[in-house]
Image (tube, rainbow, N blue to C red):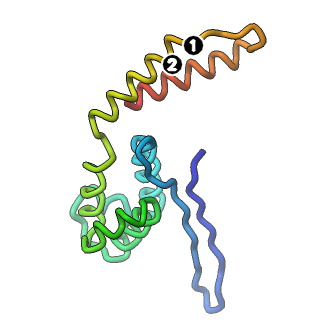
Amino acid sequence: MLELTVVTGKKEGGGGASSIQCLMLNSINDTVWAMKMKIAHKVHKAWDVIETNVVDKYKNDMAIALLFQSISETLVLQIRELDTAKKVWEAIKPRHVGVERVKEARRQTLMAEFDRLKMKDSETIDAFSEKLSEIASKSAAL
């Protein structure tokens, strides 16, 4: 369910245009969002400006564009004055990524889901094992 789409088209004169769509950050997908954003930034060779203090205007602008595309307008307005991708990432993190009480609530929800899980008579073993794997993956991510 990767929602990163890159569409490029050639313009006259050799330049290219691209359109990038990223997974929108919300209150329940912060862990997956962070992983997907890290990969998207790596694909676009822009992760190093977030991870380190590398100064590269093009990479910084690309990283900020990816981040701004994946957060709400309200959050964009709150952090619009930040001038580096690293500062933007650090501003987003405490609001969503890794909030411990949210993670604990998700852990409890997953445990309750696991406790209620029963294989139906009409269900195949593969379908049931897929449900188990999904719960295990979500738990491991937390």
For numbered disc 1, what is the local secondary structure? loop
Q: Is residue 65 above or below residue 16?
A: above
For the N terminus, which image quadrant?
top right
For numbered disc 2, what is the local secondary structure? helix
Q: Rounded to the nearest whole Å, what is the CA distance between mark 2 and mark 1?
A: 6 Å
Which residue is depicted at the point 51% across and 23% down?
135
- Residue denoted by label 1: 117
Q: Nearer the viewer, residue 106 or 91?
A: 106
Three-letter code for the amino acid on which mark 2 is drawn = Glu
Whole-percent x, y for residue 121 in the image: 75, 7
Whole-percent x, y for residue 65 in the image: 42, 69
17 left or right of 30 in image = right
Q: Which mark is residue 100?
A: none
Q: Are marks 2 and 1 in contact (CB under 8 Å)?
A: yes
- Residue denoted by label 2: 113
Q: Nearer the viewer, residue 90 or 24?
A: 24
Whole-percent x, y for residue 78 in the image: 29, 66
The 10 Å Cα crowd at callout 2, few under 14, some 14 to 19, many 20 or more, is few
Three-letter code for the amino acid on which mark 1 is drawn = Leu
The 10 Å Cα crowd at callout 1, few under 14, some 14 to 19, many 20 or more, is few
Whole-percent x, y for residue 117 in the image: 57, 13
Task: Write down the quadrant of residue 46 in the picture.
Answer: bottom left
Q: Is residue 66 above or below residue 122?
A: below
Which residue is depicted at the point 70% across and 17% down?
126
